[in-house]
Amino acid sequence: MKTLFTNFKIIANGEILPQTDLSVAGSKIDSFEQRDGITYDRVIDGRGELYLSAGFVDIHTHGGGGYDFMDSVAKEYNLVAVNHAKYGCTALYPTTVSASEEELKASICAFEEAKSMKGGAKLIGIHLEGPYISKNQKGAMDEKYIRLPDEKEYSELFKLSSNIKRMTVAPELEGAAELGVFMREHDVIPSIGHTDADFKAVADAHEKGGYALMTHLYSCMPLTHRVNAWRVAGAVEAGYYIDTMAVELIADGCHLPPEILKMVYKFKPLDKIVLVTDSMRAAGMGEGVFRFGSRANGYDIVVEDGVAKLMDRTAFAGSVATTDRLVRTMVKKACVPIAHAVKMITENPALAMKIDSEYGFLKEGRAADITVFDSDINVKYTMVDGELVFEG
């Protein structure tokens, strides 16, 4: 199958390219031009109005379409991937919550079965968010499953699968430094989140432990605060200050106000800003009551006002964002140029997860993972490995 995308505004490398055509041969990107003498099986015309970019990459999602990865059902993993593909996502990292060792193992095993299933976004690797986090910064996590790093436990988890690619940890915990070393030895990305760490602890974890990514900046981490009479800079300030630290943003228009999104864009290097959904099972489902975490051991939350909340409305419980909404928020509310906002959901997550040799970039010979959308970021086509998995 040969496909020609013609008359598009092509976004790559944080800019709109002068080229307007892109051809696909089979599962690969063939050329940034129409090949002479080739008959295309399919021609998609952007009419000079539509945008085309690399497929959106979500490195932090717990579910969507009514399903959650903690339920540990392989077919439902695939249904989540199909749901997110409707919104331009072509690759994602299934993310767990703090849970028992048995539940984590079941979720990991379900990923192993589901990763080869087709029809939606690719399942690239597993992100373990917890259980080694701060109880003070647990957010929607169930406190009874939060614990200190246990070498026996995490060694067994990593032996179970080579597809664990990232783990969110509170670096101030006893044993977190050793866990950081262990992760680097196993090519796992150490990420800072759900933490009480101050500026110095974050800087030390970054320099000595290889922690180069922050899980949902601002959410579940301290800003400048007082210790006795003295002000101490927090994790958030460290995220701004350390230029080589990538930071996640839940840009759903609810977790962070536009002013904060504008600040991050102004003060962080562009290639260190990563948009994530942090979506739970209710993404794409509308308002109502849903289960946070697994059906068996989770609890009910409510979705209203475009966001998931605890039943007492005291805090958010993940999000119902989709990748298109993230880009739309950055463009419409944070006034970020569309090419820069797209970079935050394509190239930057690939760089943060060190998968940029395969994902996030439009290049000849790469997998044809492509997202097409209009000026309001309404997704028109999602292509994975040269196959259209969604047509709007």
Image (cartoon, rainbow, N blue to C red):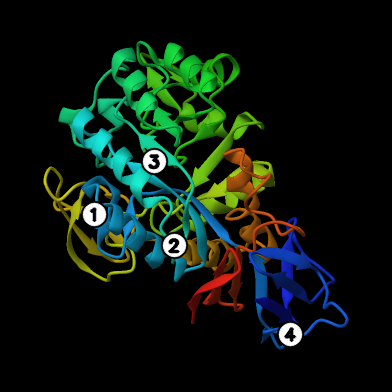
- The three-letter amino acid code for the residue at tag 1 is Lys
Residue 391 appearing in the image: yes
What crowding class fits label 4: few (fewer than 14 Cα within 10 Å), some (14-19), or many (20 or more)? few
How far is mark 2 from mark 1, CA to CA? 32 Å
Q: Position of residue 155 (x, y in %)?
A: 36, 19
How far is mark 1 from mark 3, CA to CA? 14 Å
Q: Position of residue 212 (x, y in %)?
A: 57, 29
Residue assigned mark 2: 118
| Precedes in sequence: disc 2 or disc 3 | 2
- The three-letter amino acid code for the residue at tag 2 is Lys
Residue beneath the point at 68% across and 47% down = 270
What crowding class fits label 3: few (fewer than 14 Cα within 10 Å), some (14-19), or many (20 or more)? many
- The reply to whether the C-beta atoms of the residues labelled 1 and 3 are less than 8 Å apart is no
How far is mark 4 from mark 2, CA to CA? 31 Å
- The three-letter amino acid code for the residue at tag 4 is Gly
Q: Position of residue 215 (x, y in %)?
A: 45, 38
- The reply to whether the C-beta atoms of the residues labelled 4 and 2 are less than 8 Å apart is no
**Residue 219 badge:** 3
Residue beneath the point at 27% across and 34% down = 105
Q: Secondary structure at mark 4?
A: loop
- Which corner quadrant of the image does residue 86 belong to? bottom left
How far is mark 2 from mark 3, CA to CA? 33 Å
- The reply to whether the C-beta atoms of the residues labelled 3 and 4 are less than 8 Å apart is no
Residue assigned mark 1: 309
Quadrant location of the N terminus in the rendered image: bottom right
Report the front residue among 39 and 259: 39
- The three-letter amino acid code for the residue at tag 3 is Ser
